[in-house]
Image: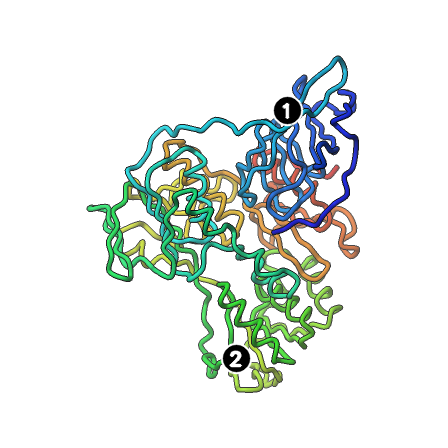
């Protein structure tokens, strides 16, 4: 996504700056050569990189420095301060890295560093096939090249489009505030230059682990040296009268989002079935398009099972303040051309229906191949399945989390990070996937960052002013930290992520 232009702030590093202006273990925002630059200090070492996250333009100076890395406060992307490398999703592109010249007790930024030397992987499969061109599949393909793999990479996607920014489909893009040119993750030229062969609008019909072949839906066969399954998930479908009417929509793909946008142009009233994250983000986006919106949810509060009562109530109040009507504790029983009927007899007039009642992992391909499944594809800590040389990542992967036990989540950032970890392990890294899950969700002026994996039943304590939308909610199972949901406390959320990683006690500063 393109970043908004910002005025340059802080000292001019071309003219020099006192070293003591940068605290040990701290960061300083400044500029040089017309660009925003972040200078960080670790002992006697100084580092200088671009100050803007390459994901959505987050301000790295407001993030968290961890050893020789910095984490973005918005969506927790990670950059190496020594090289500018984006080594942790959701950022996929590096930020510039700059040379520093020390002169006595002052330092000067004197120019960009040359590109870092190419890596050489510990091992390389004869060829790499990735099934699924979403978050995990795309991130894996890119990481294979970053790590120096020079063999053939084939990325196979059932979608008609090149990999794109799926979270935006229910947020700014659906609301009409993000242009479509922000949606593709990479250009056609990028994949050509990286020698990544993308096959779109094609699915994989079968995997044969014995012959190491995949059979495509067009009857072609491809051999693989290593295989990554990243087949994602599909929306759960309603099964009530009228569920197949032309104004009933689901949201998973870019085509789905386009379809909702087109129908919204000619609609006045919408019913969103499901008070999930997707459902509520759709509701907010349709309100931005001036539609009347009603949300039907079977729970007593939106997102109560995940976020608890207090935060669930704040989300409901925020939506209601923007005109969304809720029908909670209710389920739909029939859809007609111009209305939805609920189980208590309520009739909701509408000319657009969007269903968001959850997703199911696409595991049929794995099951047919004899790969172990259990509410997803079962993988070990290295994201490898029970069949050597076959890995799984993203919405289908059920992995052993060191904090919450074996789990599967449907978060964009998790999928990308798993794709990156799987790629490194395919090349012999033997890197355990231990990063705490993270996601973000936007509801009008309410922006939630959530790290960890808890439930609404965990003991919740608040830090800050929740009603004022400036707070964190800390979830614990007994004395064990499970998750933190933050609104306006971005740095606190990053510190919670670090505490979860290290098993440290988390205290609000």
Above-or-below relation of 374 to 36: below
In this figure, which residue is indicated by the disc labeled 2? 247
* Residue 386 sits in quarter: top left
In this view, the residue farthest toward the left is 211
Q: Earlier in the sequence, mark 1 or mark 2?
A: 1
> In x, y percent, where is residue 290?
69, 74
Q: Residues within 10 Å of mark 2 (few under 14, many from 20)?
A: many
The reply, left or right, for residue 175 in relation to residue 136 is right
Q: Residues within 10 Å of mark 1 (few under 14, many from 20)?
A: some
- Image mark for residue 99: 1
Give the label, 1 or 2, closer to the camera.
1
Numbered disc 2: secondary structure: loop
> In x, y percent, where is residue 262?
56, 74
The reply, left or right, for residue 502 in relation to residue 418 is right
Above-or-below relation of 440 to 259: above
Query: Which color scheme did the rendering employ for the protein?
Result: rainbow
The reply, left or right, for residue 433 in relation to residue 33 is left
The one nearer the camera, 463 or 220, is: 220
> In x, y percent, where is residue 248?
51, 77
- Which image quarter is the C terminus in? top right
**Residue drawn at (65%, 75%) of the image:** 293
- Image mark for residue 173: none
Q: Are marks 1 and 2 in contact (CB under 8 Å)?
A: no
> In x, y percent, where is residue 282?
60, 67
**Residue drawn at (38%, 44%) of the image:** 379
* Residue 452 sits in quarter: top right
Numbered disc 1: secondary structure: strand
- What is the C-alpha distance between the residues marked 1 and 2? 57 Å
**Residue drawn at (65%, 32%) of the image:** 65
């Amino acid at each position: 996504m393109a970043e908004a232009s910002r005025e340059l702030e802080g000292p001019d590093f071309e003219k020099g700056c006192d070293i003591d202006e940068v605290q040990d273990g701290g960061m300083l925002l400044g500029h040089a050569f017309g660009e925003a630059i972040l200078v960080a200090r670790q002992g006697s070492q100084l580092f200088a990189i671009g100050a803007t996250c390459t994901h959505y333009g987050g301000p790295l100076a407001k993030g968290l420095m961890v050893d020789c890395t910095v984490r973005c406060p918005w969506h927790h992307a990670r950059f190496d301060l020594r090289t500018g490398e984006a080594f942790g999703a959701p950022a996929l592109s590096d930020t510039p890295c700059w040379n520093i010249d020390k002169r006595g007790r002052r330092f000067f930024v004197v120019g960009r560093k040359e590109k870092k030397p190419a890596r050489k992987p510990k091992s390389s499969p004869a060829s790499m096939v990735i099934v699924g061109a979403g978050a995990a599949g795309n991130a894996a393909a890119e990481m294979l090249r970053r790590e120096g793999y020079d063999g053939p990479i084939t990325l196979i996607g059932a979608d008609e489009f090149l990999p794109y920014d799926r979270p935006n489909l229910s947020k700014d893009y659906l609301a009409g505030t993000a242009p479509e040119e922000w949606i593709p993750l990479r250009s056609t030229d990028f994949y050509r230059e990286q020698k990544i062969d993308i096959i779109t609008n094609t699915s994989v019909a079968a995997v044969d682990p014995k012959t190491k072949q995949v059979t495509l839906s067009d009857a072609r066969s491809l051999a693989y040296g290593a295989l990554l399954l990243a087949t994602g998930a599909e929306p759960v479908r309603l099964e009530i009268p009228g569920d197949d009417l032309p104004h009933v929509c689901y949201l998973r793909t870019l085509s789905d989002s386009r379809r909702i946008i087109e129908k919204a142009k000619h609609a006045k009233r919408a019913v969103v079935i499901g008070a999930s994250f997707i459902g509520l983000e759709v509701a907010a986006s349709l309100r931005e398009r001036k539609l009347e919106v009603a949300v039907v949810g079977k729970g007593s509060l939106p997102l109560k099972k995940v976020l608890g009562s207090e935060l669930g109530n704040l989300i409901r109040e925020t939506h209601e303040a923007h005109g969304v009507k809720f029908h909670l504790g209710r389920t739909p029983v029939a859809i007609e051309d111009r209305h939805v009927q609920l189980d208590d007899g309520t009739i909701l007039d509408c000319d657009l229906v969007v269903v968001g009642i959850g997703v199911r992992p696409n595991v049929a391909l794995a099951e047919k191949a004899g790969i172990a499944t259990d509410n997803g594809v079962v993988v070990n800590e290295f994201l490898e399945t029970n069949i050597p040389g076959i890995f799984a990542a993203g919405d289908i992967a059920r992995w052993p989390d060191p904090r919450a036990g074996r789990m599967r989540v449907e978060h964009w950032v998790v999928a990308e990070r798993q794709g990156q970890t799987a790629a490194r392990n395919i090349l012999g890294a033997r890197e355990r996937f231990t990063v705490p899950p993270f996601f973000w969700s936007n509801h009008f002026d309410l922006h939630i960052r959530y790290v960890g994996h808890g439930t609404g039943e965990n003991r919740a304590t608040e830090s800050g002013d929740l009603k004022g939308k400036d707070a964190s909610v800390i979830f614990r199972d007994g004395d064990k930290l499970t998750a933190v949901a933050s609104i306006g406390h971005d740095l606190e959320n990053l510190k919670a992520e670090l505490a979860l990683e290290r098993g440290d006690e988390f205290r609000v500063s």
